[in-house]
Image (cartoon, rainbow, N blue to C red):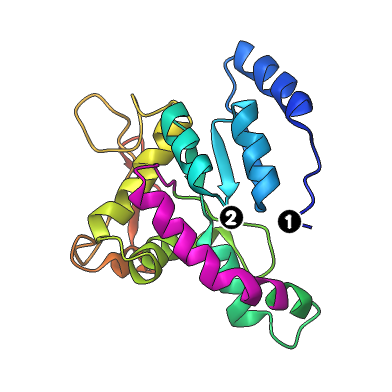
Amino acid sequence: HMFQPQLSIAEMKVAVEEAHHRGKIVCAHAEGPKGIKNAIAAGVDSVEHCFYPDEEDLNNMLAQGTFVSPTLVAGAGILKIGEGTAFSYQADKTREIWTDLLQNVAKIYQAGIPLTLATDAGTPFNRFELTAVEFQLFVEKIHLTPFQALLTSYHSAQLMKIDQDYGSIETGKVADFLVLKGNPLEDVKVIQQVDKQVYKKGRRVF
């Protein structure tokens, strides 16, 4: 349950310290208020979902350089497809918090905390190929511009500390990119193009 934290600050702090000693990134699955607060106090690099942060949390995340991965597409999929299935209890839970979630993600963004492109893929009705829909939800539900939405993928590279090689098209970086028929800066949904060309390390793979 999101309002019942599972780990103490002390437990998480040890895990974070040991992971950081080995150069690893720590992302905490935290939805409810206490879990979010504990994760931030423990020094995690990113809070996944982060449904219910308060002003203190926003200030602390900003000061610590913490990222947030909202994974809007996970909730949207459950709301859209979950009705009348074995997962209807998840649809009920998601419906209860959906408006709060959208308002709080907007607050997180407005506070200057970087949002990442993340999807929680593997949850019901949430496949990896829906990743591009997260951009659309950032624009339609959080009211980011297409450029601001696209920047979340760069923030993901920053969080993973690989932005020196990935996350943007620049001289000297790995040539991973898409070729699209439309301009995603005008309509971010064009990234969902089914027959887009996909290049990895400069070579076309799709």
- Amino acid type of disc 2? Tyr
x then y, percent, for residue 178: 30, 52
Residue shown at the point (26%, 60%) measured from the top left: 146
- Amino acid type of disc 1? Met
Predominant SS along the magenta part: helix
Which one is nearer the viewer's eye here, 103 or 86? Answer: 103
Check the image and report above or below for 56 versus 128: above
Which one is nearer the viewer's eye here, 132 or 21? Answer: 21
Q: Which mark is residue 145?
A: none
Check the image and report above or below for 17 versus 94: above
Q: Tell me the crowding category of disc 2: few under 14, some 14 to 19, or many 20 or more residues within 10 angstroms, Cα based.
A: many
x then y, percent, for residue 109: 37, 51
Residue shown at the point (57%, 16%) measured from the top left: 23
x then y, percent, for residue 165: 35, 27
Q: Is residue 161 left or right of residue 54?
A: left
Question: Which residue is labeled 2 in the image?
Answer: 52
Residue shown at the point (57%, 51%) measured from the top left: 50
Q: Is residue 28 magenta?
A: no
Under circle 2, the secondary element is loop
**In which quadrant of the rendered image does the N terminus lie?**
bottom right
Under circle 1, the secondary element is loop
**In which quadrant of the rendered image does the C terminus lie?**
bottom left
Measure the alpha-carbon separation of dots 2 and 1.
10 Å
Q: Is residue 93 magenta?
A: yes
Which one is nearer the viewer's eye here, 35 or 82? Answer: 35
Q: Which residues are drawn in magenta?
A: 92-116
Q: Are marks 2 and 1 in contact (CB under 8 Å)?
A: yes
Residue 171 image-quadrant placement? top left
Question: Which residue is labeled 1 in the image?
Answer: 2
Check the image and report above or below for 102 versus 113: below
Most extreme residue toward the top is 21
